[in-house]
Image (tube, grey):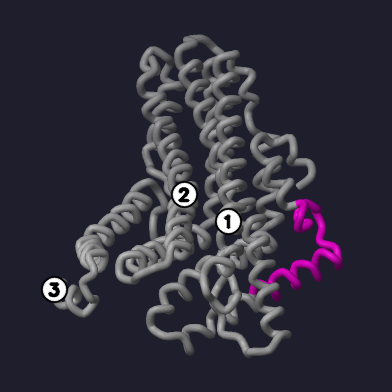
Amino acid sequence: MESLYKLQMLPVTLNLYKFIGETTATASKKLILFRLWNCLVLCIALGYIGVNFLLVEADFYVRTLQSLTYLSQPLLKYVMLIKQKSTINKLLWNILTTSWNYRWFGERIAANTERVYRIVQYTQLSMIIGGVINVIVCLARPLVVATDGMPIESHIPHTVTMTAVVLFSQMYSFLLTAIVVIGYDFIYVSSCIHVILQLRLVKLRMQQALNMFNEKSTSVLLHCIKHHQFLLSMFFCMTDIYSILLLYHYITTLVTICTVILELFLRQLDAATYITNTVGIAFLLIQFALYTFPAEQVATEFSDISIAVYTSKWYRNNIKIQKLVLYIIMKSQKRLYFTGAGLVDINAEAFEARQNEVNSTAVQNAPRYWQGNGKAAAGIPPALFETSVG
């Protein structure tokens, strides 16, 4: 991956992956051992949290589910990165070597493209800062809340050795989360942005070719079709890489957000837990948005090619070009979507559905929450306002 530093928007991700040695092309024995160590630590942390389902009381099931969801994400993405590293490397290398140079299309296009790159880089830095803050909040939770001393409640034997092992595994897992999860998400977003920008260049070039009315129109249009086919192959490659992960995010976002909202409204939480849950909801929504909105925009750009071609003066060209235009329009009218393992479409509608579920859960439980808290603040015993609420 070292050669990919020339690719716009990737240096941040590559610098993150340098910390875990995943920028090398081949896996040395040390790297293999380091990978096994990382997976072992994550499994230990997840194992001791999972035991809570057998031992904790009912009101801790929601928190245990949230914790398992939070720590299962770096393990899944780390395994996916190791398994599909060569495919990801090939995808990014093809984007670097085959993409059109946006500087060929004039100063205005170049300036707009570079502005997009800067916005994405600023967003990446903001996400890193947000991820670090989230990790700090989780690690500092035992200092504020009276718990067993762990950032995440775990059922562990009351021995100094096991307490130290579990505490180390959790803290180490949080650090891996900040590196693996953010870096893996950046690769997805950067790839989508590159495909989007290249599709816009294809649309512009097709319109220019159809408005030439000379012998070069056919060759330019054929070149555009060839590049469009390349972008389609990149799309299908990204679909294969991220299919399982997109389904994972779809399910975990739905389950986690609903359970957190219910916990916020149905239980009396301390300030630290309330802040942690609120930050967790915001992080999940932002992360799911980073997967859905770029996917929606990629699908929109692919389908917009037919509109861009049709609104040009294609009808004034010769019959050969008109046949090519008909083929392009037919090919571009089919709506393409990223899918979660072929089961659900990942797009803006999926994000809107998750947001509506959050709002619906909040609306249904807010009256009871505020009624109970208001009466409690007035000094009415809990037994009395529980009766009144019922």
Residue 342: image x %, image y %?
A: 43, 60
Say which mark, if any, is on residue 241.
Answer: 1
List the residue tagged with mark 2.
286
Q: What stretch is highlighted in magenta?
A: 18-42
* Numbered circles on residues, count: 3
Pick the residue in front: 311 or 88. Answer: 88
List the residue tagged with mark 3.
388
Residue 133: image x %, image y %?
A: 58, 52
- Please determine whether, in this image, residue 316 is positioned above or below residue 235: above
Q: What is the secondary structure assignment of the residue under circle 1? A: helix
Residue lying at 80% horizontally and 53% vertically, measured from the top left: 25
Residue lying at 40% horizontally and 32% vertically, measured from the top left: 304
Q: How far apart are marks 2 and 1 (CA)?
A: 21 Å
Pick the residue in front: 317 or 18. Answer: 18
Q: Which of marks 2 and 3 is in front?
A: 3
Q: How far apart are marks 2 and 3 (CA)?
A: 38 Å
- Residue lying at the far front in this picture: please name it: 379
Q: What is the secondary structure assignment of the residue under circle 2? A: helix
The answer to if 268 sits in the magenta stretch is no
Say which mark, if any, is on residue 171.
Answer: none
Residue 225 visible in the snapshot: yes
- Mark 1 residue type: Ile
Residue lying at 64% horizontally and 19% vertically, measured from the top left: 103
